[in-house]
Amino acid sequence: MTTTLLAQEAVGSPALNLAIFASFVAVTLALVLKASKTNKSAADMYTGGAAFSGRQNGVAISGDYLSAASFLGIAGAIALTGYDGFLYSIGFLVAWLIALLLVAELLRNTGRFTMADVLAFRMRERPVRTAAATSTLVVSFFYLLAQMAGAGGLVALLLNINGRGGQSVVIALVGILMIAYVLIGGMKGTTYVQIIKAVLLISGAALMSVWVLGRYGFNFSELLGAGAAAGAALEPGAKYGVSGISRLDFVSLSLALVLGTAGLPHILMRFYTVPTAKEARKSVVWAIWLIGLFYLFTLTLGYGAAALVGPDRIAAAPGGANSAAPLLAFELGGTLLLGIISAVAFATILAVVAGLTITASASFAHDIYAQVIHKGNAPEGQEVKVARIAAVVVGAVAILGGIAANGQNIAFLVALAFAVAASANLPTILYSLFWKRFNTRGCLWSIYGGLIVTITLIVFSPAVSGLPTSMLKSVDFSYFPLANPGLVSIPLSFLLGYIGTITSKEYNAAKYAEMEVRSLTGAGAVRTALKH
Amino acid sequence: MSSSTQPEGGRATYTPQEAKYLAAQEAPDFQDLRRRYRGWVIPVAIGSLVWYFLYVALAAYASDWMATPVIGNVNIGLIAGLLQFVTTFGITALYIRFANRVLDPVSSRIRDEFEAGTL
């Protein structure tokens, strides 16, 4: 096959890609069906009965976290721009220290199902739950959109479907599969899918990394040299170093990446799937090792793709930068390895969207329906029913949004979700866990303020209008110079939480005592699995 | 009794459950646990963020210096990036050691005493 052919057509064999992916679906569906036998109560649906071990959950967290954007996106960014792609992965990894040190264990001890459980603990329940559910839904929506839009691009490359209509059908199929996983298997089924996907993804990346290094006599420096010769820069600056604004934009992005992770609702919810805080700690430790290892592999894959495939061929391929890893797989192991890596990439999207759907539906059913509307007195069977309906609605919205967003910049949508999570969620979580005086007004100002400021700044940013790379190219209302709002929105949200708190007299000493004792020792915390 | 431990909303007394948590919060064992936990995690979290933003600032504003080769094609930037991995893994390992040795014995003792009503 010649280079020109590669650039024009899908590589490998679409039929084989499809067959490998279909077998992944068959195996996971069988597991999900098996999990469905114990998917009855709200606790089963949301947390799999909190019966996973720390290790299982840690693998599932890495499966939930390592989205298509980080596998295909980072490898592609390194292949095309070099070092600047690597910067993303460092932010994504260091962020886990915040989750490990400040959030995971306290959250597990304090809450049961959702992020709002913790935020509303010592506040006025209904307004805080409404706010927390709103930001959960917004973050999950942007994240879902990114994944679904990514599925469209991937299809173009792997199944040789280039028409927009055909891609829309595949996006819809991914959405329907994800709804099926969530409805049938609940959190338990979803966790199995994430575990299998994580194992496949990390071992696939490991195999390719060793293979690439083998081509260069296991000499990393030589690989870097070959990548650099092909055009992937070895020093930072190729993408972010062009101007003062782009440098500031990069600092702003870094802030959102490092503070966003511990505020992502679908990640927080995973901490409830283990029986104790100690297991939650173990989960994060496993996740850190696996995620860190994976990002080291993507570094090798990125420079390997630059060296062996070449930035020009990658940029010209149907999926653009996202095709770097699949094209590298084809270069190394031909049709078969490409098929495997493609199936893994699909599995990645499927597992992440299933996790997001379950989070969004749990937040709606548990926070809005059961607690806000029914003040905690909804019949349990009814809550599960609402969660299922919500999952179908979220899935449908994700399909439509994904079809509409097909072709949009995935990395931008993910960065947006991180910016909202870091601005609207993280300040309230930290204040709530560590600041005695924090109260309802501070909580609401921080969540809504963070949400509104972030989205407003994005609407008026060059990511939406004014540049050839913007969403709307023909108009220009980009009054805010940065594409990433974090540098402004995150400190502002912390400040709003502070001002809101000190201007309100509300303080609940007894609830604070309960929260503090519970969060640090687990006394009185829900330890479901121990009853089994 | 200090004003911060007065029940809010004009109530005169706490429920037995509330009183139990308030007593547990005041217990010297718990105060000690809280001090040790916060005394470790807050400085370490701030330190690792400072270290990360130092790296980000160097990448953004000192890219020429980061491009200095050290061994073969491996330059300062790459070593600094890999050092972020090393410190993340290292802090994780240290925290596990600290939590297992210092936090867990105290927190499980307090929990047991709390649930047995002997705190």
Image (tube, rainbow, N blue to C red):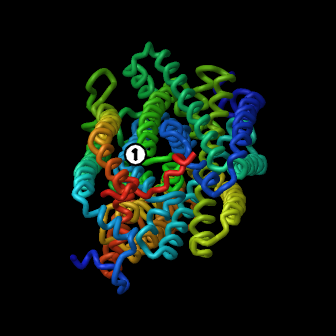
Name the quadrant containing residue A400: bottom right
Whole-percent x, y for residue B77 in the image: 31, 35
Given residues B91 and B47, the one toward you in this image is B91
Whole-percent x, y for residue A41 in the image: 66, 56
Residue at 31%, 67% (x, y): give it. B22
Relative vertical location of residue B38 with respect to residue A294 in this rendering, above or below: below
- Residue lying at the far top of the rendered structure: A217
Relative vertical location of residue A491 with respect to residue A338 in this rendering, above or below: below
Q: Name the amino acid type tagged 1.
A: Trp
Relative vertical location of residue A54 with respect to residue A444 in this rendering, above or below: above
Residue at 48%, 40% (x, y): give it. A54
Badge 1: how crowded within 10 Å, few (<14), some, or many (20+)? many
Circle 1 SS class: helix
Given residues A298 and A191, the one toward you in this image is A191
Q: Which residue is mark 1?
A: A96
Given residues A109 and A353, the one toward you in this image is A109
Q: Is residue A163 left or right of residue A455?
A: right
Residue at 33%, 54% (x, y): give it. A244
Given residues A355 and A320, the one toward you in this image is A355
Whole-percent x, y for residue B29 in the image: 24, 54
Q: Is residue A209 left or right of residue A507?
A: right
Label 1 marks a residue whose chain is: A
Relative vertical location of residue A129 with respect to residue A343 in this rendering, above or below: below
- Residue A422 in sight in this render: yes
- Residue lying at the far bottom of the rendered structure: B10
